Amino acid sequence: MDTSTLFRLDGRVALVTGGSRGIGRMIAAGFVAQGAKVYISARRAEACLATAQELGENCIALPQDVSTVAGCTALAAQLAEHEERLDILVNNAGAAWGEPFADFPEKGWDKVMDLNVKSPFFLTQALHGALQAAASPDRPAKVINITSIDGLRLNAWETYSYQASKAALIHLTRRMAARLVKDSINVSSIAPGAFASDMNKAARDHGAAVAQNIPARRIGVEEDMAGTAIYLASRAGDYVIGETIAVDGGLVHASVGASIDG
């Protein structure tokens, strides 16, 4: 058994949505470091282009808003101008909305559910042909949905649509996995806990305090997220299908009741 290239991604093509910052950027950087050619997409073109430049010549920006089906279709068409196949799709673009129960608005429900649940499905559908073109039983293509530990347990915040959307995406991951494995496309998900990002301002601005409620006694860092994504995307993760991996320092599965914003 040769494990020397088990986690390498040489020759593989990846697309990471929401790849200009936060968790998406961590994953994109990890893929580039392992030899992949990585396309990143984000709604803000300037940020997308800047991140691609920072990550080097093997990272290419495809700015696009994937919050609508039309945007998903447009991104698939953009990628097709550059590539005939796609080995790895990371559905990371997401949104959150927090507001008290009595005031929670319909727009806060629709925006979050559309981007967090609807878009991963329709983008994967739009890229199905490209994923099939890369896939084989010996080297399956991969779809990695970025969910959240908030889809696995409650947090203390009134983020109703966010928590519902992430629970839905975890179950959708299993349903998509059951269908797409027939095409040698493996679907799985990563459920992050506390990582410093614009979405998780508590971890970003008060990391030391947040860490006190995490069994590992720290918040997540870039290598934690990149490492898990590389595992699932590479040969090392070829036999993992439909699974959701919590990357949270033990908060969900090794905690006796602490609660933070994931």
Image (spheres, rainbow, N blue to C red):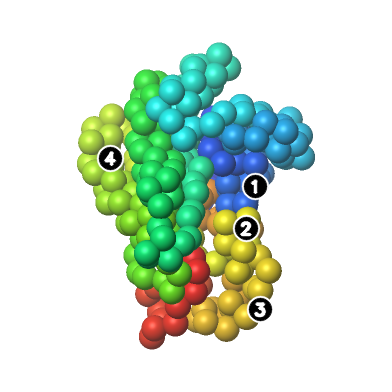
Q: Residues within 10 Å of mark 3 (few under 14, many from 20)?
A: some
Q: Which residue is mark 3?
A: 208
Are circles 4 and 1 on residues that touch, CB within 8 Å?
no
Q: Which residue is mark 1?
A: 21
Secondary element at tag 1? loop
Are circles 1 and 2 on residues that touch, CB within 8 Å?
yes
Query: Relative to residue 60, is residue 107 depicted above or below?
Result: below
Whichever of labels 2 and 3 marks the residue nearer the N terminus, that label is 2
Q: CA distance from mark 2 to mark 4?
A: 28 Å
Q: CA distance from mark 4 to mark 1?
A: 26 Å
The label nearer to you, 4 versus 1, is 1
Whichever of labels 2 and 4 marks the residue nearer the N terminus, that label is 4
Query: Relative to residue 222, is residue 129 depicted above or below?
Result: above
Residue 197 disc label = 2
Secondary element at tag 3? helix
Q: CA distance from mark 1 to mark 3?
A: 21 Å
Q: Amino acid at mark 1?
A: Arg
Whichever of labels 4 and 1 marks the residue nearer the N terminus, that label is 1
Secondary element at tag 2? loop
Whichever of labels 1 and 3 marks the residue nearer the N terminus, that label is 1
Q: CA distance from mark 1 to mark 2?
A: 8 Å
Q: Amino acid at mark 2?
A: Ser
Q: Residue at x 53, y 21 (%)?
A: 79
Q: Residue 226 in the image: x percent, y percent?
A: 58, 53
Q: Residues within 10 Å of mark 4 (few under 14, many from 20)?
A: many
Determine the image quadrant of residue 56: top right
Query: Relative to residue 208, is residue 50 depicted above or below?
Result: above
Q: Residue at x 37, y 70 (%)?
A: 154
Q: Residue at x 63, y 56 (%)?
A: 198
Q: CA distance from mark 4 to mark 3?
A: 38 Å
Q: Residue 212 in the image: x percent, y percent?
A: 57, 83
Q: Amino acid at mark 4?
A: Met
